[in-house]
Structure formats: structure tokens, C-alpha cells
Image (cartoon, rainbow, N blue to C red):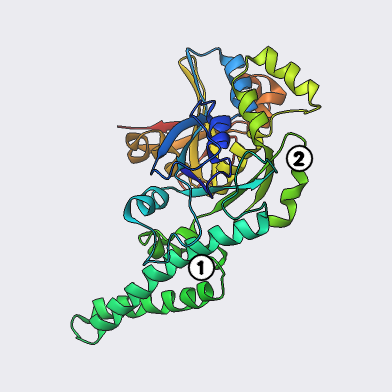
Amino acid sequence: MQIGIIGLPNSGKTTIFNALTRGDVETAAFSSGRMEVHSAIVEVPDSRVDWLSNLYRPKKTTHAQVQYADIAGLARGIGEAGGLSGPLLNEISQNDALLLVIAAFDNPNVLHPEGEVNPERDIALIESELMLNDMVLISNRLERIDQRLGKGGDAKELEAMKLERQILEPLMASLEEERPIREADLPEEHAKLLRGFGFLSQKPMLVVLNIGDDGDEEIAAPFTAKRRPAIGLRGQLEAELAQMAPAEAVEFLEDFGIAEPSLSRVIHLSYDLLGVQSFFTVGEDEVRAWTIPVGATAVEAAGAIHSDLARGFIRAEVVAYEDLQALGSMAEARKHGKFRLEGKEYVVQDGEIVHIRFAL
């Protein structure tokens, strides 16, 4: 899973990236203008994994992971000349979701590309650039479809193109009304067809308002939209916190009156944004969180571990995390009837401990 961090120049993208990844990529009060991308993998904080690890004392503990990519800053009008440039478009489109950083702090030493801080305007500006790129793609595709339909040919191919046009034309109308594709209620088969286009405004988005050390995190509430949650974050403070030793970080949080770092919420929101969840496998060798889509079946969960387990699937042994935690051991879970055998079509729930029975 990969999430691209985008935003206007000087919005604090790299500061947020450093905070999320405990990185030390250099930041500056001006835009270099270069096409730069930095990426890093982050563990998804999960107290359930930690508890299971303490219970089983395995040789290895593996959390779920999210990869973040800090992408060069966007700017007003960047997509006007026929859509985003190839390298920039490729960097953004390969992500499963987007994290949009918006400057919500006043600093006379940091120049805002639009002259002044205005989160509402900046969100609309970036959304417009993404939608403009999608409009170019749809316009070009509709033109090619019309040309192909005018030539006749294979009936099955022509019917597929007609269906594609029926899907794309309403989306074009929505984009012209400044509604991103992610807000459209598309049937799954239509959404699947569109994935090949890499539409930027179709990607789920998390808006992070980068506030100052004394900023109010509640500033983000009005900017939440469909498939686009928003959160306020003290970017610089969190970046400094990420570089500290644990004991020093606790003292730092107490000095600022912060119960816990906001970054954990950002990472969890990123994970949720992708429509995925975790299930766990446990044992002496490893306790591990595995990532699957919400609604995935037991055989699909088996496939996430290894394709051989899916091919030879017999049954899934399942225990809810809450039951295991309450009872203290797998033996007690069995004794109290909390240990279940499930078949291929069973829909795995978030946090379940799953063991796959299979035959080679």
C-alpha cells in the first residue's frame, strides 16, 4: 500500500513526511523547483500486535505497513497545458491514496505561493488541478471511442466501448461541476473498469492541515468530505518528536499538554482510507499483522499469507482478538467455545487471529 504526499510548495509536505517516517529529509523555506520524491515504509501502530507479541514471545513481530512517498510540490496551473507532466503524473498516479498537506500556519519566514494562508482555497486549488488532469484523460478517451465506433467492427468490442462511454460521460459532467470522481457512487464493476485510467480525483484522499505549535487541531473539521477525511497536525512539533528517544518524547508531550502523538491517528486514517484491515497469525516463530481488504473471505486471507494456502485451503481456525485477550490463552478460548472453524466464504473481521488448515 502506498500513499503519496502532495501539496503546494512550502506547505510542509516534507516536514509531515519526516514526522510520519521518522526521517530527516532536508526542508527549506522555499521551493527548489526540482522533481524530487522521497519514500519510506511505516509500521501501523497496533496495540493488539504488541499484546499478542507479549503473550507468545515470538522470535519476530511484524506490524502492518504503509509506504509514504513525498512528491514534489504542485502549483496553480500546473495541469493546464494538457494535464500533468509525465514524471509528476506517474509519481502521483501509482499511489493507492493521497495525503494532501495544506499550510495552516503563519510564518513570515515561509513564503506561501498564493500570498497568504487560506486552507479552503488551497484545497480547492489542488482538487481542481487533479480534476483538470482527469478531464483531459476522459476527453481524449471519449474522442478515441467515438472514432472507433464510427469505423464499425467486432460487435463485442463495440458494446464494451459503448458501456465505457456511458460510464465516462457522467463523470465528465461531474468534473465540470467541480465534483471529484471519488464522490461518485459507482457500482463495483464500473469502479474496477476505471482503475486502469489512474484518475487522480478518484483516489481516496486524507487532508492534513499543517498547523503551528499553538494551532487548533479542530480547524480541520469543516474540510471533511466524502472519502476525504481531514485532520489538523502540528507538523514541526511532531517532526521533532519523531526524532526523540521514547523517554524524552513522553516528557516533551507532557510539556505541551498532548496526550499522545497525532501521527498515530494520521497513520490509522491512512490505513482506513484504503479500505483495508488487519488479521493476525501467531506462534513461537512470528506474530504478524496481515493486510486484507475489508470484506475479504477466509480463502483470500489465506492467499495474503501465501498462494499455496489459498490453493490448498481446507478450513480457517478463527478467534476474535477481544476473546483471546479476555480469556488469556488459546486453550481458554477453546474451552469457552470462542475457537471456531470457518470455510472459504467466511468474511474475516478486523483483528481476528486466523490459522489456515490446508493440504498441498
CA distance for labels 2 and 1: 38 Å
Asked which secondary structure carries label 2, the reply is loop
Chain-order first, disc 2 or disc 1 = 1
Q: Position of residue 75 (x, y in %)?
A: 49, 55
- Compared to 340, does 3 lie above or below? below
Q: Position of residue 233 (x, y in %)?
A: 68, 39
- Compared to 210, does 90 lie above or below? below
Left or right: residue 334 versus residue 158 is right
Q: Residue at x 57, y 43 (%)?
A: 270
The residue under label 2 is 215
The residue under label 1 is 186
Left or right: residue 239 versus residue 87 is right
Viewer can see residue 63: yes
Q: Residue at x 45, y 15 (%)?
A: 285
Q: Which quarter of the figure has residue 49?
A: top right
Q: Quadrant of the N terminus?
A: top left
Q: Which mark is residue 298?
A: none
- Judging depth in this view, the residue of 231 and 279 nearest the camera is 231
Viewer can see residue 1: no
Q: Position of residue 230 (x, y in %)?
A: 66, 50
Assess whether mark 1 and mark 2 are in contact (beta carbons under 8 angstroms): no
Q: Position of residue 143 (x, y in %)?
A: 31, 79
- Judging depth in this view, the residue of 146 and 100 nearest the camera is 100
Q: Amino acid at mark 1?
A: Leu
Q: Quadrant of the C terminus?
A: top left
Asked which secondary structure carries label 1, the reply is loop
